Amino acid sequence: MAKTMKSNNPAIAVMQQMLQERCIAEPMFAIKMANPSKSMEGAINYLCSQIQKSGLCVVDNDTVMNLLVHYFDENEIEEGAKVNCNIVVSKPELSEEDKANLKEKAMEQYKEEQLRELRKQSQPKAAAPKHTATAPKAGAEINVQPSLFDL
């Protein structure tokens, strides 16, 4: 694998997996992939140049697979110039097991949040400072001498 493709390693790994599955399903395709004039780097360059020519930004797995297979099937195909692009792999649909695990984690997180909220509510609240001094009412006399009984 070329070092220039380092940032796209996850996408390249997915494409290699797709091609390996195709080789298992069709042993004749494995012979075509073994062609010394063909390489994974060449296939990816061809793929990117074809997608760029089409004007699309996003393609599905079938389109990617068809372009890769076409590159390895045809001897006359040139791989094309290197295209400066980012290849991103979308996440597959979640299995029922994954969905159940995520639901369980979400429930645990929800329970923890609810417990935190209950603990926060059950903590004693700080007493508000009592307001002891009041302003005299209009017309009332002001007592200049402090009294021990006024609290």
Image (cartoon, helix red, strand yellow):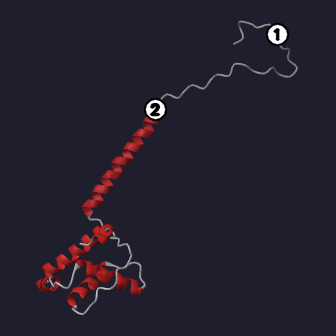
How many numbered dots are placed on residues in this image? 2
Q: Which quadrant of the structure image shows residue 57?
A: bottom left
Q: Position of residue 50 (x, y in %)?
A: 35, 85
Q: Which quadrant of the structure image shows residue 13?
A: bottom left
Q: Which residue is mark 2?
A: 122
Q: Closer to the camera, 43 or 110?
A: 43
Q: Residues under labels 1 and 2: Cα distance?
A: 45 Å
Of all residues, the one furthest to the right in this rendering is 139
Within 10 angstroms of label 2, few (less than 14), some, or many (20 or more) residues? few
Secondary structure at badge 1 equals loop
Which marked residue is nearer to the observer: mark 1 or mark 2? Answer: 1
Q: Closer to the camera, 84 or 141?
A: 84
Res. 57 visible in picture: yes
Q: Is residue 26 shown above or below 121? A: below
Secondary structure at badge 2 equals helix
- Label pair 1/2, CB-CB below 8 angstroms: no
Does residue 112 appear left or right of residue 94 in this picture?
Answer: right
Q: Amino acid at mark 2?
A: Ser
Q: Amino acid at mark 1?
A: Val
Residue at 69% of width from left, 19% of height from top? 132
Does residue 64 appear left or right of residue 134 in this picture?
Answer: left
Residue at 11% of width from left, 83% of height from top? 27
